[in-house]
Amino acid sequence: MERCPALDLVSTIRHDGEGGVADDLATVEETTRWVRGQDALLTGSLSAGDFAADEELRSEIVALRQAVRALFAQAVSPAPPSRADAHRLIPTDQALARLNSAAAREPVAPQLDWRHGEAPAALVLSTELDSRVRLIAGLARSAIDFLTGPQRDQLRACAAPRCVRYFVKGHGRQEWCKPACGNRARVARHYQRRRGSADVEAG
């Protein structure tokens, strides 16, 4: 599956491997590292090796992530959202306003690209010179594209213990974002069954 910047963004909140939650955008340095790992189409004219975030940009990306995670929670409803921030999600109308405002910061025009022998493709032409604006707007457009596209119906919050990721379901019975989460969930179910049996016997 092609990488989706919006999914990459929400996945910067993740299980830390020790029972807690890690934030890959917690510092300016971590934010710089994350942005450098993004696709060239997302960063536009940015040179990944030269890019360096500052606290203002980090705060903007984190605020946008909060909005996208709130909208992802809305998308998976009535199923439970990610446990990472289910208790502090911002209201949907506020999330929508924040996302749309971020996307509107970059003036763009759709362009049709149709090369000989290939299928037609839609491109986005931008005249924005500020690469940071392009970064924020590109992330916002990725979320809009995802939430209005066919993958939204396959979006799930991983049901494994301690996992806080969202993922796109690849097949009908998939419940977890990756095999390791499936293994952890099966172990937890086995433990619960054994504990329940022990409680019955003790009673």
Image: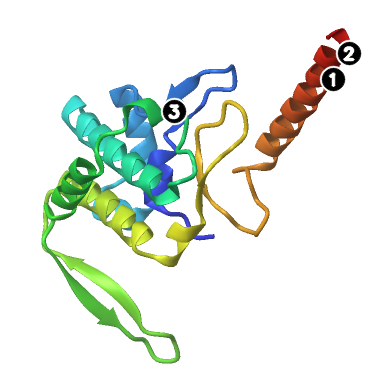
Image quarter of the N terminus = bottom right
Image quadrant of residue 118?
bottom left
Across and down, in percent, residue 39 comes to 39, 52
Q: Mark 1 — residue?
A: 197
- The numbered dot on residue 201 is 2
Q: Image point 62% across, 43% down: which residue?
A: 176
Q: Image point 37% across, 58% down: which residue?
A: 146
10 Å neighbourhood of mark 1: few (<14), some, or many (≥20)?
few
Q: Amino acid at mark 2?
A: Glu
Image quadrant of residue 127?
bottom left
Across and down, in percent, residue 69 comes to 35, 40
Dot 3: element? loop
Residue 71, compared with residue 162, is above or below; it is: below
10 Å neighbourhood of mark 3: few (<14), some, or many (≥20)?
some
**In front: mark 3 or mark 1?**
1
Looking at the picture, tell me which residue is in the foreground, 118 or 138: 138
Task: Say whether disc 3 or disc 2 marks the residue closer to the N-terminus.
Answer: 3
For marks 3 and 2, give the CA distance.
Answer: 36 Å
Residue 74, compared with residue 147, is above or below; it is: above
Task: Say whether disc 3 or disc 1 marks the residue closer to the N-terminus.
Answer: 3
Image quarter of the C terminus = top right
Q: Amino acid at mark 1?
A: Ser
For marks 1 and 2, give the CA distance.
Answer: 6 Å
Q: Mark 3 — residue?
A: 84
Q: Residue furthest bottom?
A: 116
Q: Image point 38% across, 46% down: which residue?
A: 72
